[in-house]
Image: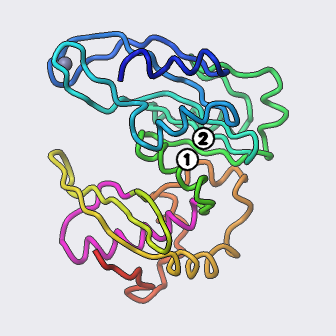
Amino acid sequence: MDLEDCSDMKENRSETVMMETQCPFCGKVFDYPMCTEIIIPGDSKLKKKVLNKTLFVPKCPHCNEEFKLKPKCMYRNETKREWFVVTDSKDGELENVMKGGDLKFNDVRAEENIVDFMKGLYTRRVVYNVDAFREKILLSEYNFDDRIIELMKFSLSGLIEKDSHTHVYRIFLEESSGNDMIFTAILGSHAPFEYATIKSDLSTYNQYRTKYLKKLGNPNEDEYITTDQEWAAKTGLLKDEDAGFVVPMQG
Ligand SMILES: [Zn+2]
């Protein structure tokens, strides 16, 4: 991506900072305008760029290769009251900050009244990579409950691992249209990874939702701040299912 991609932000309220980035292909360093804040309503163009996977994917000006950044960015949807943060630091500090509602996030600008209205009122999530960040926003667009999706993916992962004898490194909802839900699984324990596309359908999501939503609390509670595959495992909810409360696989 080039500078022009971030130019919309001047018209909106989003912050951008120049960040030094090292190209993993040629090793050269260049400055890249990092979008650190996406606020809806207002920044719908930026949201689209996250969804179509162009926002955090710079092209190296030296060797022209594209690569995925490890961004620090805050997404806030004021209409839906959602607050998603992607960060590369896994020390849990940010999670605590989110629980307290007191956001001081390096380059991310916090508003003065953020403490009052964030805590308890917003559905807050912390994620650690661009794919997960995109997925949270995507799930919000589709009005899917991300906790139900994590449970579904957990079950799906188990089936894939059993079937292919390969470790599922990550799995994400890629898109959904009509009755189809398309997941991407990244397979393997280390690079180079393989990618697999798995189809499921909406009725499975609805089945999961009916069965498990009543066992979960309000999505804006602190315990759901890191809703991911680890969380899904920890709930133990799928533990007693027979070898599958099975996701129909067509792909
Ligand atoms: Zn390069």
Q: CA distance from mark 2 to mark 1?
A: 8 Å
Residue at point 68%, 45% (across, down) = 82
Q: Nearer the viewer, residue 180 or 225?
A: 180
> Percent x, y for residue 247?
41, 80
> Percent x, y for residue 195?
23, 56
> Percent x, y for residue 65?
20, 26
Which residues lie in the magenta part? 146-171
Examine the image and state in which quarter residue 98 appears: top right
Q: Residues within 10 Å of mark 2 (few under 14, many from 20)?
A: many
Which of the two labelled residues, at mark 2 and mark 1, occupies the earlier sequence position? 2
Classify mark 2: helix, strand or loop. strand
Circle nearer the viewer, 2 or 1: 1
Q: Main secondary structure of the magenta part?
A: helix
**Which quarter of the image is occupied by the N terminus?**
top left
- Viewed as shown, does residue 113 lie left or right of 17? right
Residue at point 48%, 50% (across, down) = 135
Residue at point 45%, 59% (across, down) = 229
> Percent x, y for residue 6?
49, 20
Q: What amino acid is labelled 2 in the image? A: Phe
Residue picked out by circle 1: 137
Q: What amino acid is labelled 1 in the image? A: Ile
Q: Could you say which disc has been placed on residue 84 in the image?
A: 2
Q: Quadrant of ligand 1?
A: top left
Residue 248 among those drawn in magenta: no
Mark 2 near ligand 1 (CB under 8 Å)? no
Residue at point 27%, 30% (across, down) = 67
* In the rendered image, the vertical position of residue 41 relative to residue 246, given as above or below: above
Proximity of marks 2 and 1: CB atoms separated by less than 8 Å: yes
